[in-house]
Every structure is written in C-alpha cells, then in structure tokens.
Amino acid sequence: MRNKAYKEKKQAGEAVAIGSEQICSICGKPYKVTAGSQKYCKECQQKQARSKKISSNAQYAKANYKTLKLYVSAEERDAIKAYAESQGMSVNKLLLTALEEYKANHGEK
C-alpha cells in the first residue's frame, strides 16, 4: 500500500527527490533532502523531536505522578543526592526504598 501511494505521489509530481533542495517550513532556510519523509532542516527537525519528547514525557508524568515537596538544607540535599548516586539510585528511588525498609523494620501503620 505504501509503495502504491508513493508511486501515485511520484506520478503526480508531488514526491520529493532525495538530494534535492527544499525550503524548511519552520525557519525558511534551504536544506538538502536526506530522507523521503523529511519536512524540515536538521536543526528544526531536532527541535521538533525534542519538543515532542518533552511534551509526551510531561503529559505522562502529569497523568501518572504527583509531586511531593521535601524541604532540606542545601548541605542535606547535596549529601542525599551524593549518597543516592553512590548507591546507583535516583533520589526518588532512594527515598522510596528507605520508606519500604522503614515499614518492614517498624511495622506498617
């Protein structure tokens, strides 16, 4: 189906040839086409990919996680962060692990 669609597009003169020069629809700069589906110059393509990734990650986090604020001094923060890294964990994982161990040793209430 994809090959058929491409053939029709090519016959209609709408297909973009690899190696041809196009104008980026975002920044307006000319670029050389390196893939059939390319719509933007390399710089704008990377910006688009980053913004989509950030957006989808932010949406996932917003839908699945809630924020918990923890106030500590700068020294304590640095010490917690350093300890977590030395254990190969994120601060989040360290705190969740510590909570589980606390529950196990002191009984869950």
Image (tube, rainbow, N blue to C red):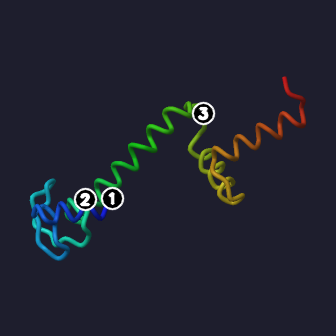
Which dot marks residue 20? none
Could you say where residue 50 lies in the image, as x and y percent from the top left?
A: 35, 54
Q: Secondary structure at mark 3?
A: loop
**The residue under label 2 is which amino acid type?**
Ala
In depth, the one of 89 and 40 nearer the eye is 40
Near mark 3 (Cα within 10 A), the count class, few <14, some 14-19 or many ≥20, is few
Near mark 2 (Cα within 10 A), the count class, few <14, some 14-19 or many ≥20, is few
92 left or right of 35 in image: right
Could you say where residue 4 lies in the image, as x and y percent from the top left?
A: 27, 62
Residue under pointer 3: 70
**The residue under label 1 is which amino acid type?**
Met
In depth, the one of 17 and 98 nearer the eye is 17
61 left or right of 78 in image: left
Q: Give the residue displayed 14% in from the left and 60% down from the top.
A: 24
Snapshot quadrant of residue 11: bottom left
**The residue under label 3 is which amino acid type?**
Leu
Q: Is residue 19 above or below residue 36?
A: below
Quadrant showing the N terminus = bottom left
Residue under pointer 1: 1
Q: Are marks 1 and 2 in contact (CB under 8 Å)?
A: yes
56 left or right of 75 in image: left
